[in-house]
Image (tube, rainbow, N blue to C red):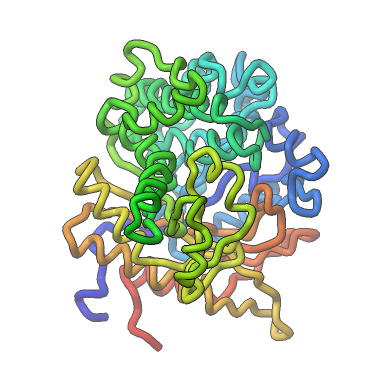
Amino acid sequence: MTGDRSFPDGFLWGAATAAYQIEGAVSEGGRGPSIWDTFSHTPGRTFNGDDGDVTCQHYRFIDDDLELMKQLGLRAYRFSIAWPRVQPDGKGPANQPGLDFYRRLVAGLRDRGMVPVATLYHWDLPQALEDVGGWTARDTAERFADYAAMAAEALADDVGMWITLNEPWCSSWLGYGTGEHAPGRTGTDLSVPAAHNLLLAHARGTEVLRRETKAPVGITLNLGPKIPGSTHDLDVAAARRADGALNRLFLDPLFRGAYPEDMVRLFSGQRPTFDAVEPGDLSAISQPIDFLGVNYYHTDVVVDPGRLSEARAAGYCASPQEDTGEGAALRAVTVGRPALTRTATDWEVDPAGLTDILVRLRDEYTRAPLYVTENGSAQHDYMGPDGVVHDAARISYIREHVQAAKDAIDQGVDVRGYFIWSLLDNFEWAKGYAMRFGLVWVDYPTGRRTPKDSFGWYRRVIAGNGLPEPD
């Protein structure tokens, strides 16, 4: 291995999962229903009517999965705690069998030399809280603090890093804006208050974790560049609005103690969506964090909706559905670059965007350590006649993005870890089981696990603390 391919000593190589996507056992051990149970059982909400009732059966195969992680050589494992497994109704006493499951997981990780990285919220809000307003209700942030205290009391001695929220943009925009995700409600008069209350929950949870544990505390955001499709003023303005909704609406309050003025003007001009902000909220939200988690999958090229014909003439491709949902609220349309490869999610493969967003975070927002907490490639994998899943496209994707993270490090960005999404094939939210993200193939009817080619390749990366020489 050459020096420029190696990562810093102590770099945290990991893999990530989420509770509802892998655990199954939705009615076992005292777990209560979540918004994703309700959503996935509502006709027409998910691909093929798929749900997470069984999925990977991680609740049952926990020991097998721990051994797979050990075999992979992981230095860290990022998992999420299911709020309704710990507190079935989102209030009241802790459910001890639920906490015992996570105690067992964390102890198993420590026994195998891995750092447990716990995410408190990965989208599975207890349905009982949604019934009284969900994330549009300020009280949900206070309930989150109570839940955080229960998790910290049970697991503080062994969890190595705490993440309060995963991707609050998805919870607010997709859950309460476009309705593509649970709970399936729609309107910017809902999504912006939901975003604020999620950030307030981060603040309340951080305060609790600081009091109950000495482990580092951070938050994970899904971030990515929004590039104007041309130099035309309308396209530049559209890209700026799209950047505001995805990136600045969360980064600015976290690191600058204020919402972006252009976003406040945009949304307050439609409805009084920022009325949820109370005195003291932004100072609490902007309290220092120990690290920032970055989930990165793709970059978007954006144009004004009135300039779609010009974008097509310039060689971009655009889908009609891009004119709805978030794009309509922002007057911004994502267009495709035909020259770029796409994953099964129809996301463009653009590793340079990861370098760009990491450098931007350092230059514009924070010198706190950064971790790539999710990055991966959905593919239409299949088991070959030799009993092996040959996923060369995934290996290529990971290689290019690991190199992109290294490029940021070489530019002086303090990137301390990289977590593959995902360890296992799983329930991919509204997309159900239409595609696979895992390093490990899961036969859903039986739960049988089969490591893919990418599993062996990533094991070499971890063992060598960097990219191996090309074969």
Q: Answer above or below: position of 273 versus 161.
A: above
Left or right, 387 with respect to 345, comes to right
**Which residue is nearer to you in this view: 355 or 24?**
355
Q: Quadrant of residue 343?
A: bottom right
Q: Answer above or below: position of 143 versus 452.
A: above
Whether residue 305 is visible here, answered yes or no, is: yes
Q: What residue appears at the point 47 percent right and 63 percent down from the top-left corner?
A: 310
Q: Position of residue 370 (x, y in %)?
A: 29, 48
Q: Quadrant of the C terminus?
A: bottom left
Q: What residue appears at the point 48 percent right and 36 percent down from the top-left corner?
A: 168
Q: What residue appears at the point 58 percent right and 52 percent down from the top-left corner?
A: 322
**Which residue is nearer to you in this view: 331 or 272?**
331
Left or right, 143 with respect to 277, comes to right
Q: Quadrant of residue 92?
A: top right
Whether residue 149 is visible here, answered yes or no, is: no
Residue located farthest toward the right when viewing the structure as drawn: 43
Q: Position of residue 387 (x, y in %)?
A: 70, 80
Left or right, 249 with respect to 449, comes to left
Q: Quadrant of the N terminus?
A: bottom left
Q: Answer above or below: position of 204 versus 108.
A: above
Residue located farthest toward the top when viewing the structure as drawn: 279
